[in-house]
Image (cartoon, helix red, strand yellow):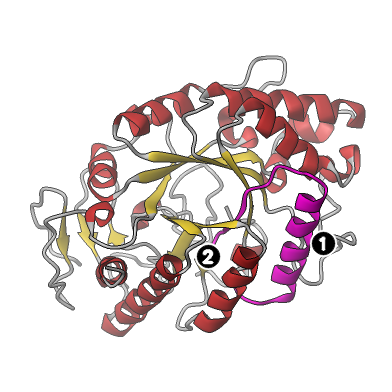
């Protein structure tokens, strides 16, 4: 996930109550697509499509979200962060029961599992014992955690985000490869901590695809150049890296991304033989401090729909792209909504309604936006 306390601060930020079985169309503008099948069953090019679920296992996920995911998705992102509950005490084994339950549920539903993530340096900074850990102990501790997590459900996880957000943004301190140097992982182990993580993951779950995951690199930018050069270098060094995850957070309200630049950039990575995953797509539609009264208007919803549709279209037209994951998939669980959850959410007091569905909390109607139709339309066009 995007480096919450850095990048997200750049730019972050009623419906009638209707009884529904799962979701209904937004009343204005009207949504005309008949919801007889979920996204996963829309005829067209086969692609993994899913969303992120963060909970203490499938049983901890509200029934409404599980039902929606089961209907719509053939894949799911399961979040496990060392700093946010998975490894609270290094003298004890990692706490992975919730991840086990989520993987078991997803496997039962025949969903592919995208594991996020084995190593997330920006999140690990929030863990006090990790900050205070002597440098010489950092490598064995990380190896212990990564190997425990990667081997826990070995053979059931389709793809792992092995290292998340290791590359610096423009203007940050970085090394010659573009890696952030301020992280404890870098300072205690050295720049090869990324390589080490991939080797540990490969040993622990040899069947899983292994990728590096980054934000702000989906278009042709200096950061994307650094990322491409770096992953090419890793592969030349024999590192078992299969692909690249592009988070694809679209936070610039009112502006459309440069689609041609995104398309050309993804092609560059494909030309070098890397599998491509869109891992964390969301599209901020408005900025509101009163979500009950200040909701996206018609124009904002139509722009959000167009962005979702066009990015989905780019994904399905790129043969090397294997997956499109939403982050999350209902507004009231989005990390861009205040206090939406404890797992890395950014509480700015602002709401940006970034997902394809209004609502999401227990007891709330889950209401499809035009953005949902945009995704469906793009999937249908690939027939």
The answer to whether residue 231 is magenta is: yes
Pick whichever, 44 or 32, lies toward us.
44
Residue 297 percent location from the top left of the image: 29, 80
Residue 86 percent location from the top left of the image: 58, 28
Magenta segment boundaries in residue numbering: 219-248
Identify whether 181 is placed above or below 62.
below
The answer to whether residue 37 is magenta is: no
SS at circle 1? loop
Pointer 1 or 2: first along the chain: 1
Q: Tell me where residue 245 sits by quadrant.
A: bottom right
Q: Tell me where residue 357 sits by quadrant.
A: bottom left
Q: Is residue 87 visible?
A: no
Residue pointed to by mark 2 = 248
Crowding at mark 2 (Cα within 10 Å: few <14, some 14-19, many 20+): many
Residue 322 percent location from the top left of the image: 47, 55
Q: Is residue 280 left or right of residue 30?
A: right
Identify whether 225 is placed above or below 347.
below
């Amino acid at each position: 996930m995007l480096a919450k306390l850095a990048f997200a601060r750049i730019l972050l930020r009623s419906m009638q109550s209707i009884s529904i079985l799962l979701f209904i169309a937004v009343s204005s503008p009207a949504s005309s697509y008949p919801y007889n099948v979920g996204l996963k069953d829309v005829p067209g090019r086969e692609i993994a499509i899913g969303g992120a679920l963060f909970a203490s296992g499938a049983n901890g996920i509200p029934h409404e979200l599980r039902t929606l995911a089961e209907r719509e998705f053939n894949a799911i992102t399961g979040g496990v962060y060392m700093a946010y509950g998975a490894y609270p005490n290094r003298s004890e084994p990692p706490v992975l029961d919730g991840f086990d339950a989520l993987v078991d549920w997803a496997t039962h539903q025949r969903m592919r599992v995208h594991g996020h993530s084995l190593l997330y340096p920006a999140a690990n900074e929030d863990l006090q014992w990790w900050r205070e850990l002597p440098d010489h102990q950092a490598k064995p501790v990380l190896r212990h955690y990564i190997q425990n997590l990667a081997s826990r459900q070995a053979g059931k996880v389709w793809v792992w985000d092995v290292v998340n957000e290791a590359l610096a943004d423009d203007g940050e301190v970085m090394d010659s490869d573009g890696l952030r140097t301020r992280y404890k992982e870098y300072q205690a182990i050295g720049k090869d901590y990324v390589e080490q993580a991939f080797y540990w993951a490969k040993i622990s779950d040899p069947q899983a695809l292994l990728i590096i995951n980054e934000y702000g690199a989906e278009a042709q930018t200096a950061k994307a150049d650094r990322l491409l050069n770096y992953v090419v270098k890793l592969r030349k060094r024999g590192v078992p890296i299969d692909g690249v995850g592009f988070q694809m957070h679209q936070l610039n309200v009112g502006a459309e991304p440069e689609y041609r630049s995104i398309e050309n950039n993804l092609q560059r990575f494909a030309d070098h033989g890397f599998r491509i995953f869109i891992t964390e797509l969301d599209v901020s539609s408005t900025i509101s401090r009163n979500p009950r009264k200040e909701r996206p208007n018609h124009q904002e919803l139509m722009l959000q729909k167009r962005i979702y549709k066009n990015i989905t279209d780019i994904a399905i037209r790129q043969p090397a792209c294997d997956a499109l994951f939403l982050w999350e998939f209902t507004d009231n669980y989005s990390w861009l909504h205040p206090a939406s959850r404890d797992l890395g959410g950014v509480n700015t007091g602002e709401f940006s309604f970034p997902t394809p569905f209004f609502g999401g909390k227990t007891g709330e109607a889950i209401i499809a936006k035009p953005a949902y139709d945009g995704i469906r339309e793009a999937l249908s066009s690939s027939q």
